[in-house]
Image: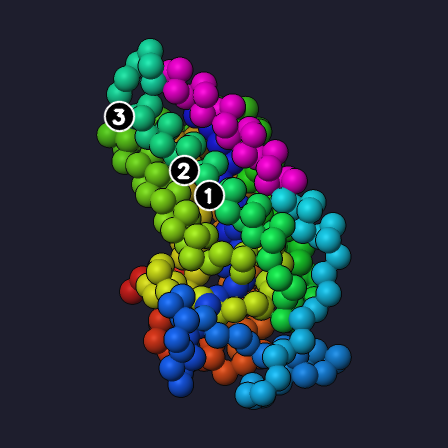
Amino acid sequence: MLEPIMTDVKIASDSGVKESSQKGATDPRHTAKLTAPAAAGGRAANSRSATSAPASLATPRWTRILPAAALALLVAWQVADLARALQLLAREPNWTNAAQCARGMNYALFLCLPIAALLTQPSALAREDRRVVKIAAVTATFLLMGLGLLSPQGALLFHPSPVVTLVALWASVAGTVLAIASGWTLGGNFAIHPEVRELVTSGPYRIVRHPIYLAEVMMITGFVIVNARVVTMIGSVLVIGLQVIRIFAEERLYRNVGPDYCAYAARTRFRLLPRVW
């Protein structure tokens, strides 16, 4: 079963992060509001106000509806692909076909999380306005969606053994499970463009600072090994590179907005790969 891999679909964004207050939070989800930029010139406030809530930024509704609609189309495509995979599993029951079904089902479930977040989330406290970052975020989110439609075209560069194929598929299944866990923890903080709402430090965010992007790397790796074509390999490298840009942009935004992120980064040292980076 061929499927496009979410970009933070990140297809999801890791932009929002929930952080428990250093002075003791009583909220069971360990969340704390972050301050918004202090000036129109883009400068961030250097400290949080203890008495007033940060102002929210107005967001045109179409900027949420359009990506939610695009993700909904991808869910429909995944469900149709899953139906074909289930038929194949019924005819040829084996672990490889079971992995294909599990990956498709989990990925469709995961995509429902950012759709719900985009349609129900509150306004952001701060957002990244640099055009190059916005282009990188949108491209990273939807590039592999388009490439997934083209992936059956072109010859395979190599044919992995059945064992390698099985391992790659179940690695991508593990990636979808991590994506679901991360997306559920992220809640309404998902965004296509880097935005600040709350700082998330619970669940998978205790291990690395961008677990949805780690999940994407796992899914992409399994996808490319099984579908080793020029188009998918080039697209996958581009998506991973664009996600690195998003990581630095998101962290820059959070560091500028408030002090909580610096404490979180000191506790959770690794951005993407535990013990590596």
What percent of the width, then of the height, locates residue 180? 41, 47
Q: Amino acid at mark 2?
A: Asn
Q: Where, by quadrant of the figure, is residue 206 drawn? A: bottom left
Q: Is residue 125 above or below residue 132?
A: below
- State left or right for residue 217 relative to residue 16: left
Q: Where, by quadrant of the figure, is residue 97 drawn? A: top left
For the C terminus, give its image quadrant: bottom left
Residue indicated by mark 1: 110
Tell me how far mark 3 sits from mark 1, CA to CA: 22 Å
Q: Earlier in the sequence, mark 3 or mark 2?
A: 3
Asked if the magenta segment contains residue 80, the reply would be yes
For the point 57% across and 67% down, the residue is: 197
Q: Amino acid at mark 1?
A: Phe
For the N terminus, give its image quadrant: top left
What percent of the width, then of the height, locates residue 205? 38, 63
Label disc, if present, on residue 95 of the rendered structure? 3
Q: Is residue 58 above or below residue 116?
A: below
Report the front residue among 158 and 125. 125
Report the front residue among 54 and 43. 54
Label disc, if present, on residue 106 of the rendered structure? 2
Q: Amino acid at mark 3?
A: Trp
What percent of the width, then of the height, locates residue 266? 37, 78
Q: Is residue 21 visible?
A: yes
Q: Is residue 23 above or below residue 165?
A: below
Report the front residue among 50 and 66. 50
Report the magenta residues as a range: 69-88
Tell me how far mark 1 sits from mark 2, CA to CA: 6 Å
Q: Secondary structure at mark 2?
A: helix
Instruction: Indicate the colouring scheme.
Output: rainbow
Q: Are marks 1 and 2 in contact (CB under 8 Å)?
A: yes
Q: Are marks 3 and 2 in contact (CB under 8 Å)?
A: no
